[in-house]
Image (cartoon, helix red, strand yellow):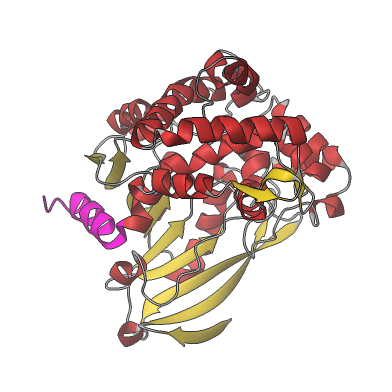
Amino acid sequence: MSSYRQPGVVLTDRHFTVPLDHTDPGGEQIELFGREAVARGKADEELPWLVYLEGGPGFGARRFVGTEAWLGRAVEEFRVLLLDQRGTGLSTPANRQTLPLRGGPREQADYLAHFRSDNIVRDCELIRPQLTGGAPWTVLGQSFGGFCAVRYLSAAPEGLKAALITGGLPSLDAHADDVYRAAYPRIERKVAAHYARYPQDVERVREIAAYLAEHRPESAGHRLTPEGFQSLGIMLGSGSGNGSHQLHYLLENAFVRTPLGIELSDTFQEAMRTANSFAGHPLYALMHEAIYSQGKQPTGWAAERVRAEFPQFDVATALAGDGPVLFTGETIHPWHFEVDPALRPLRETAELLASRTDWPELYDPERLAANQVPVAAAVYHDDMYVDTEHALCTAASIRGLRTWVTNEFEHDGLRAGGPQVLDRLLALVRDDV
């Protein structure tokens, strides 16, 4: 354990050991990492704890510098644990380099089956007494971190003083098919809004997609394809409204004139490769559909199958006609594991996870209906990643949950409006509004 200072905060790096399989506490152990943050003037005070669970799945906790974003507001009254969830960041990372230590694809898939919200919550409950002396703490869950918070309320509410959720209320019973069946129309509306804002992008996007379909270039081993280009639409749900502008700027320098004629610019190819790479968060691709799985029905590449119900998203069809090429969003497809060198070695592992039929139930509707933990949730009305109707249905199913429904922010509102968002949620759980 080591401590050091940044502007306004004292940081302490903490390491914890937990079972890989919590049903076998004496079996294999894995190491977790969390960074404690406390205001410099309060480092010696007895403060309540707040544990932060990042969105994803597959992302480690954000590396703040000093008191930026919402952290400055949080350390005014909390001692904060920024937890890297298992498999992410410094918590026994799972990726193409480390997973072969488990064995072949079957062993890797069996290992990764332990990396969902149920075990993340069990990890938290082992860590909590070590830090709080047994006292309950507050959980702040962003996006997938909010899914984990709802699991927390289902499985171990006695560990929680309060739950704060931002852009992360999951459906309690929707299959992955239902999630994507609701998602594609939302994505289409976002694309339509982008093209209404930047009509010049309609033809530019067609030109880029046609070039990629013909040439299939590679950038640092990453194959650039029309489908990969479509996935840049994930930007349209981020930046709290700025994603559309950022996408436009990325598109505007797509082509350059060379001695061989017009070619896709190195600048664009690098930007596309970077945006499409899962090198820093491979669990996002491997486990994304699994976070919705409950029971015996496999996900079976739900986003790919459901996409067939929306033929307007097919690039070849769009290019053959005169319609716009539509971007996609937060969807994972089999081809991701063919074009991305960070995922290519994990293709068979992904197939085994997609066909898995023994996922445990994640949520307890009866327990949630009897909830006694103060809960507040920010629901972003224009959220491209989490369906608003699903979120509000879940909110109505959790006793005492108070919602703040807003279109002031999009999915990453905690990052864009951190102090304001956190203030609002804390006020809701304290009945101050």
Looking at the image, the residue that sits furthest to the front is: 259
Q: Position of residue 380 (x, y in %)?
A: 31, 40
Main secondary structure found in the magenta portion = helix
In the image, 217: left or right of 420? Answer: right
Whether residue 296 is visible, yes or no, is: no
Image vertical order of residue 271 relative to residue 118, above or below: below
Image vertical order of residue 79 relative to residue 419, above or below: below
Whether residue 7 is visible, yes or no, is: yes
Task: Name which residue lies at 58% across and 29% down.
Answer: 293
Image vertical order of residue 168 relative to residue 89, above or below: above
| Nearest to the observer: residue 343 or residue 398 | 343
Task: Name which residue lies at 76% across and 37% down.
Answer: 216
| Nearest to the observer: residue 289 or residue 312 | 312
Q: On the image, which quarter does residue 350 sit in?
A: top right
| Nearest to the observer: residue 4 or residue 64 | 64
Q: Position of residue 264 (x, y in %)?
A: 66, 45
Q: Quadrant of the N terminus?
A: bottom right
Q: Position of residue 291 (x, y in %)?
A: 57, 36
In the image, 231: left or right of 367? Answer: right
Task: Name which residue lies at 76% across and 42% down.
Answer: 217
Residue 421 on the magenta span: yes
Residue 387 on the magenta span: no
Query: Which range of residues does the magenta coloring cover?
Result: 417-433
Image vertical order of residue 65 relative to residue 143, above or below: below
In the image, 392: left or right of 201? Answer: left
| Nearest to the observer: residue 99 or residue 31 | 99
